[in-house]
Amino acid sequence: MYTLEFTEQAIDDLKLLKRSEPSAFKKVQKLLLELMEHPRTGTGKPEIKKYDLAGLYSRRISQKHRLVYQIKDETVTVIVITAAGHYDDK
């Protein structure tokens, strides 16, 4: 089982989703539970990113939002980087 860690940006994003888009927040909660079990497979179409985000993974929360995270297998940790928006639209 992987441990989750959150960047300040991810925490701010989660607060924003909880306040402004409750359905997206509910979905991200399910995705976070799934990340703890199997961060490379599951719902939200997990994919490894290229170019600027090389080495990071993303999953679809909604049409508008993506969950971007990094997997650290050596420490069995998933670092959640962002949880709202679509990559560079911040």
Image: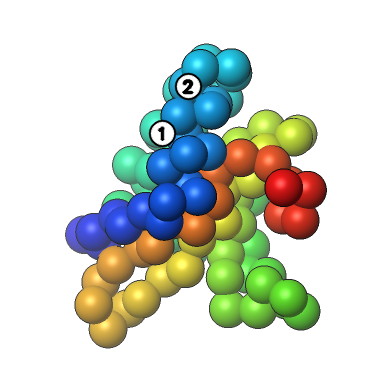
Element under label 1?
Answer: helix
Q: Position of residue 66 (x, y in %)?
A: 64, 45
* Image quadrant in which you'd find residue 23: top right
User: Is residue 25 among what the camera can see?
Assistant: no
Q: Please give the name of the residue rendered at 54% of the width and 44% of the height, measured from the top-left corner.
A: 83
Going 63% across and 69% down the picture, which residue do you hit?
A: 48
Tell me residue 42's x, y (percent): 50, 49
Q: Is residue 45 above or below residue 40?
A: above
Say what amino acid the circle numbered 2 marks: Lys
- Secondary structure beneath label 2: helix
Tell whether 65 sits left or right of 77: right
Colouring convention used in this rendered image of the protein? rainbow
Going by the numbered disc 1, the residue's amino acid type is Lys
Task: State the residue at coordinates (32%, 78%).
Answer: 73
Residue, disc 2: 18
Rate crowding at label 1 as few (under 14), some (14 to 19) or many (20 or more) other CA atoms within 10 Å: few
Q: Position of residue 46 (x, y in %)?
A: 59, 56
Left or right: residue 15 versus residue 56 is: left
In the image, farthest residue toward the bottom: 74
> On the rendered structure, is 42 left or right of 46?
left
Which residue lies under the disc numbered 1? 30
- Looking at the picture, tell me which residue is in the foreground, 40 or 90: 90
Q: Using the image, determine if residue 10 lies above or below residue 56.
A: above
Q: How many marks?
A: 2
C-alpha gap between disc 1 and disc 2:
13 Å
Confirm or deny contact between disc 1 and disc 2 (CB under 8 A).
no
- Label 2 neighbourhood size at 10 Å, few (<14), some (14-19), many (20+)? some
**Percent x, y of residue 53:** 67, 72
Q: Which residue is at a point 67% across and 32% down the rendered structure image?
A: 62
Quarter occupied by residue 50: bottom right
Q: Earlier in the sequence, mark 1 or mark 2?
A: 2
- Position of residue 37 relative to residue 85, above or below, is below
